[in-house]
Amino acid sequence: MATLKKRSEFLWVRGGRRWSATAFVLEARSRQNVAEGEAPARFGYTVSKKVGGAVLRNRVRRRLRALTAALKADQVHPGYDYVLIARTAAAVRTFTDLKADLDQALIRVHQAPGQKRRGQKSA
């Protein structure tokens, strides 16, 4: 899976859709000038010093990479860039819970704006 490397790529994704989970925030944005299915999805990882020292930050980054490596091909959209911003809970949350959070976040960022969730009451 391709990764985001440049700061400008991270900043560009920031303008897209986002979803907050307990252990991370997922941001997603479709790349411009790329035909659907032509380019693979790319991931970026951000772990700030608020999470902890260098050893803990690296451990959290490895956990986030393992999460994205475990994704099925139909969960991510080709031509999209994703950024996972870790929170402090990412260090202690179980991998199963992290996986469930990521699955839910991917569904949410790809929902059409204004689309109702199943079981949501209308106002």
Image (cartoon, rainbow, N blue to C red):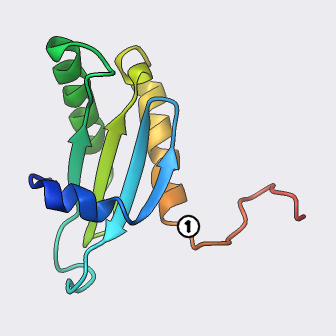
Judged from the image, the secondary structure of the residue bearing numbered disc 1 is loop
Residue 15: image location, x then y, percent: 38, 65
Front position in the image: 51 or 105: 51
Front position in the image: 91 or 14: 14
Residue 102 sits in which quadrant? top left
- Residue drawn at x 38%, y 24% is 90
Residue 99: image location, x then y, percent: 42, 35
Question: Compared to 18, does 112 lie above or below?
Answer: below
Instruction: Judge left or right: residue 82 versus residue 121.
Output: left
Type of the residue with mark 1: Gln
Residue 12: image location, x then y, percent: 26, 65
Residue 116: image location, x then y, percent: 73, 66
**Callout 1: few (<14), some (14-19), or many (20+) C-alpha neighbours within 10 Å?**
few
Instruction: Judge left or right: residue 83 versus residue 75.
Output: left
Question: Compared to 99, does 111 lie above or below?
Answer: below
Question: Compared to 97, does 28 lie above or below?
Answer: below
Q: Is residue 3 visible?
A: no
Q: Quadrant of the C terminus?
A: bottom right
- Residue drawn at x 23%, y 63% is 41
Instruction: Judge left or right: residue 84 versus residue 37.
Output: right
- Residue drawn at x 44%, y 21% is 89
Which residue is tagged 1? 111
Q: Is residue 38 visible?
A: yes
